[in-house]
Amino acid sequence: MAYPRLAVFTRFPEPERAKTRLIPGIGAAAAAAVHRRLTERTVAILRAGAGDCAVEIHYTGADAIAFRHWLGDDGLAYVPQPPGDLTVRLLAALDPAPVIFFGADTPDLSPAIVHGAVAALATHEVVLGPAEDGGYYLIGVAASHRFLFADMAWSTATVLAETLNRLAARGIAPAMLPMLADCDRPEDLARWPWLMATCV
């Protein structure tokens, strides 16, 4: 199998538009700062764990020039996200498989997790990193399994369960990675003091 692409979805850290669910607790500027730090850390982790895999930044909220100025240009590919919901954006990035999709809001993501996802995808059709909130922090597919992304109720506690149901209906047993937590709400920040330091 070819090496999977590692695709992280993120937006430009503009106040009022980044990590909006954090804004009621810490304000728009601090929420954007948290998002900036999380994205920078995620990209660094992907680069550290990529091996021979290509790392792609699927971006929105600014142009490629702004993102290259922010995140650098060495070894990264920049791909604009199309207009539409998460289903539209994931399906647009699905081919060519294999590919592993990451969000930019998992503070405990590590190079070991990335290595594990890449290794698992060599022997499984699908790899999942379950999130504590009922979703997932990564999903990798060895083929263009469009059924995993169409008509999904994103940002709900049923995303992982629905994904597992769809896989089971097709006789696909996914590889499961350790469960991690995303940072989405103000109360989540207490778990990661180093992130809270960006808020002052």
Image (cartoon, rainbow, N blue to C red):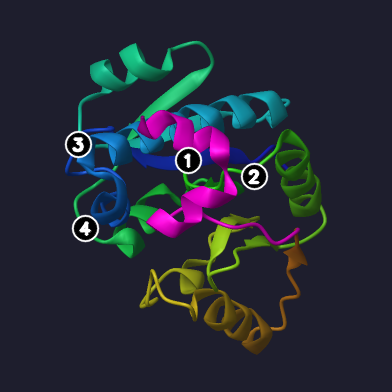
Of marks 2 and 3, which one's residue comes earlier in the chain? 3
Kindly identify which residue carries mark 3.
Answer: 15
The numbered dot on residue 200 is none
Report how far apart the C-alphas of labels 4 and 2 lie in the structure.
29 Å
Which quarter of the picture shows residue 134?
Answer: bottom right
- Please name the residue shown 26% across and 52% down the image: 20
Report how far apart the C-alphas of labels 1 and 3 lie in the structure.
20 Å
The numbered dot on residue 108 is 2
- Dot in front, 2 or 1: 2
- Dot in front, 1 or 3: 3
Of marks 2 and 1, which one's residue comes earlier in the chain? 1
Report how far apart the C-alphas of labels 2 and 3 lie in the structure.
24 Å
The numbered dot on residue 8 is 1
Mark 1 nearby-residue class (10 Å; few <14, some 14–19, many ≥20): many
Range of residues picked out in magenta: 178-200
Mark 2 nearby-residue class (10 Å; few <14, some 14–19, many ≥20): some
Mark 4 nearby-residue class (10 Å; few <14, some 14–19, many ≥20): few
Q: How many marks?
A: 4
For the residues bearing labels 2 and 1, Cβ distance under 8 angstroms:
no
Question: What kind of residue is marked 1?
Answer: Val
Pick the residue in front: 195 or 60. Answer: 195
Quick check: is 186 in the magenta stretch?
Answer: yes
Report how far apart the C-alphas of labels 4 and 3 lie in the structure.
21 Å
Question: What kind of residue is marked 2?
Answer: Asp
Would residue 38 be seen by someone viewing this image from the given angle? no
Say left or right for 130 vs 14.
right
SS at badge 1:
strand
Quick check: is 70 in the magenta stretch?
Answer: no
Kindly identify which residue carries mark 4.
Answer: 84
Question: What kind of residue is marked 3?
Answer: Pro
- Dot in front, 4 or 2: 2
- Please name the residue shown 50% across and 40% down the image: 7
